[in-house]
Image: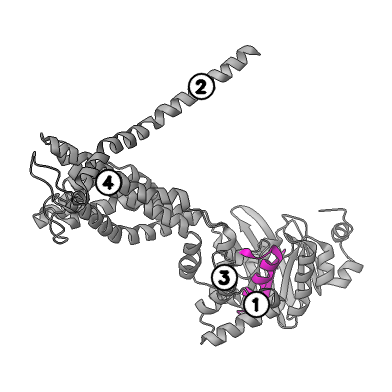
């Protein structure tokens, strides 16, 4: 009896410890980024958000071009990726037993786990090399490819989660399949689809690897056109920490905190407020 | 004239033979009940009549189903479903749409109305016909999910009859309702049969006796007996029917 109780306790303590160790890095990241980054943001002030990069060992300047670049890249990636991803998700949900439907689901799962640096290499091959220059378009295309499987899988799951009775109800009204999907089911699944869209956006807003060989990075010029190189916050952090200058490391911490804030601003509302439609 | 006829109808789910050679003649503007114990194939049979069964890829249909003399398999399934409306066992108004939009959807997407005024008129007509107008006239634009179960089911009836179908299929429409709501639906059936043919599936012989003019008794996918309701209930010819009606089965 006593032995069993002790075993029980040990088990619970063991699991609790492992759980704590698992989520420890998350708190460590948030904490250290806040501690190191907050003084930088306070010191840099408004100029840190709107200004351009300072010279080495000469103050903080700002990371405006990278912030604008991140928004431009995310917007363009959404423009390229979302329509295709949502249609793909619809296809996989509507034709789950067809050969192409089954293949789509499997391929989407593989794409989700695909090393994103390879996506960057692929886009470099098909866009950067022929155009002869890094560009916002190439960066956005790479991000779109990273984003698509998330949105498609969430869309597919949201549609598949709709009880059969609504589907049958819509068909029983003599609606075409197109109308059943686009006028009834999409509306029912909208929260799930929106969750997928926001998760896709949050994911690519923080991506670095797909941008390495595509976006090019720009620290002193703002967005100049989709065929020109563009900066991005993760890319800037990656560049700055490799430099031997103390002020660049400080800027990197500030940029990290901003990136974290942008990420949380997209991600927290998803988790807190989006609830599935009551079915 | 018969609204619906089935001829040597067989239905299979994969290798499962669920409907076995059923011949039915359903007269126009009557209430035709299909009764039988759970799992006897009633719902499957009903769903084949408006070709809804074909949404299920495993289902195979053999034989013929005629709607006013014309084979439904020679018709576009979309047209069949417009002419043969359906109400389901679980009330299924679209929860993200308003009461008004639930009814307006089919009318708009099937292009059955020319103006907003006409749309409003038909929605009102359908709600009055389904005895729901007085309860919802002040909240037409509120979500349909706020209604009670019985109200939802009447909304589904309104949604179906708004398209002016010739036949209305009802799959155990009162199975999930309280007795008062169930009674309202049954009263509605009397009202509706003046204009259309109703085919109702029920596992309750009492309900079949109350609402129907004709009744078919289905057992393990076979049609055991069919005829005028009073004849079947007063004088069943088959032993199985008598057993079922006297509660010694199912």
Q: CA distance from mark 3 to mark 4?
A: 42 Å
Tell me the residue that label 3 is attached to: B98
Q: Residues within 10 Å of mark 4 (few under 14, many from 20)?
A: many
Q: In this rendered view, identify the residue nearer to me: B53 or A133.
A: A133
Q: With A197 as the anchor, is A272 left or right in this view?
A: right
Asked whether B169 falls inside the magenta stretch, the response is yes
User: Which type of secondary structure does the marked residue at label 4 adopt?
Assistant: helix
Do pointers 2 and 3 mark residues of a single chain? Answer: no
Residue at 84 percent of width and 68 percent of height? B209
Q: Specify the quadrant that holds the N terminus of chain A.
A: top right
Residue at 15 percent of width and 57 percent of height? A222
Tell me the residue that label 2 is attached to: A13
Q: With A277 as the anchor, is A49 left or right in this view?
A: left
Let me know if residue A209 appears in the view.
Answer: no
Q: CA distance from mark 2 to mark 3?
A: 51 Å
Q: Chain of mark 1?
A: B
Q: Specify the quadrant that holds the C terminus of chain A.
A: bottom right
User: Residue B137 location, x and y as percent?
Assistant: 65, 77
Q: Which disc number belongs to residue B137?
A: 1
Q: CA distance from mark 4 to mark 1?
A: 52 Å
Q: Nearer the viewer, mark 1 or mark 3?
A: 1
Image-quadrant location for residue B17: bottom right
Q: Is residue A253 above or below residue B41?
A: above
Q: CA distance from mark 2 to mark 4?
A: 37 Å
User: Which type of secondary structure does the marked residue at label 1 adopt?
Assistant: loop
The magenta segment is B146-172
Tell me the residue that label 4 is attached to: A258
Q: Nearer the viewer, mark 2 or mark 4?
A: 4
Q: Is residue B94 above or below residue A145?
A: below
Q: Chain of mark 2?
A: A
User: Residue B212 location, x and y as percent?
Assistant: 80, 72
Asked whether A75 falls inside the magenta stretch, the response is no
């Amino acid at each position: 009896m006593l032995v069993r109780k002790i075993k029980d306790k040990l088990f619970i303590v063991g699991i609790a410890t492992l759980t704590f160790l698992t989520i420890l890095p998350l708190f460590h990241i948030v904490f250290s980024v806040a501690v190191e980054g907050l003084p930088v943001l306070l010191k840099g002030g408004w100029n840190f958000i709107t200004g351009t990069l300072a010279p080495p060992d000469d103050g903080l300047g700002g990371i405006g071009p990278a912030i604008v670049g991140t928004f431009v890249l995310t917007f363009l990636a959404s423009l390229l990726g979302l329509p295709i991803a949502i249609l793909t998700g619809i296809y996989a949900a509507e034709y789950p037993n067809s050969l192409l439907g089954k293949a789509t689901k499997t391929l989407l799962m593989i794409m989700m786990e695909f090393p994103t640096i390879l996506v960057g290499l692929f886009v470099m091959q098909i866009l950067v090399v022929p155009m002869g220059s890094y560009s916002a378009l190439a960066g956005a295309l790479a991000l779109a490819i990273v984003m698509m499987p998330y949105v498609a899988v969430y869309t597919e799951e949201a549609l598949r989660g709709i009880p059969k009775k609504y589907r049958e109800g819509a068909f029983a009204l003599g609606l075409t399949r197109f109308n059943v999907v686009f006028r009834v089911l999409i509306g029912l699944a909208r929260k799930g689809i929106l969750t997928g869209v926001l998760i896709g956006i949050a994911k690519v807003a923080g991506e670095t690897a797909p941008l390495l060989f595509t976006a090019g990075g720009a620290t002193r010029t703002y967005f100049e056109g989709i065929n020109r190189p563009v900066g991005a916050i993760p890319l800037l952090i990656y560049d700055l920490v490799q430099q031997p200058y103390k002020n660049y490391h400080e800027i990197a911490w500030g940029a990290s905190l901003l990136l974290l804030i942008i990420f949380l601003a997209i991600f927290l509302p998803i988790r807190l407020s989006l609830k599935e439609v009551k079915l | 004239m018969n609204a619906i006829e089935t001829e040597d109808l067989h239905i299979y789910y994969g290798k499962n033979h669920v409907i076995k050679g059923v011949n039915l003649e359903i007269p126009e503007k009557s209430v035709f009940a299909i009764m039988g114990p759970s799992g006897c194939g009633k719902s499957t049979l009903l769903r084949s009549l408006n070709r809804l069964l074909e949404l299920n890829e495993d289902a195979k249909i053999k034989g013929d189903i005629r709607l006013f003399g014309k084979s439904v398999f020679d018709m576009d399934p979309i047209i069949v479903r417009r002419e043969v409306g359906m109400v389901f066992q679980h009330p299924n108004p679209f929860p993200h749409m308003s009461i008004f939009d639930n009814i307006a959807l089919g009318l708009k997407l099937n292009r059955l109305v020319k103006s907003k005024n006409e749309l409003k008129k038909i929605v009102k007509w359908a709600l009055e016909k389904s005895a729901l107008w007085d309860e919802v006239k002040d909240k037409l634009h509120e979500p349909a999910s706020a209604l009670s179960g019985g109200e939802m089911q009447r909304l589904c009836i309104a949604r179906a009859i708004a398209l002016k179908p010739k036949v209305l299929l009802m799959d155990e429409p009162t199975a999930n309702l309280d007795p008062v709501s169930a009674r309202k639906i049954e009263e509605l059936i009397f009202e509706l049969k003046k204009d259309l043919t109703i085919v109702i599936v029920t596992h309750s012989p009492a309900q079949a006796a109350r609402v129907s003019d004709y009744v078919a008794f289905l057992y393990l996918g076979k049609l055991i007996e069919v005829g005028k309701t009073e004849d079947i209930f007063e004088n069943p010819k088959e032993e199985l029917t008598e057993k079922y009606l006297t509660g010694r089965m199912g």
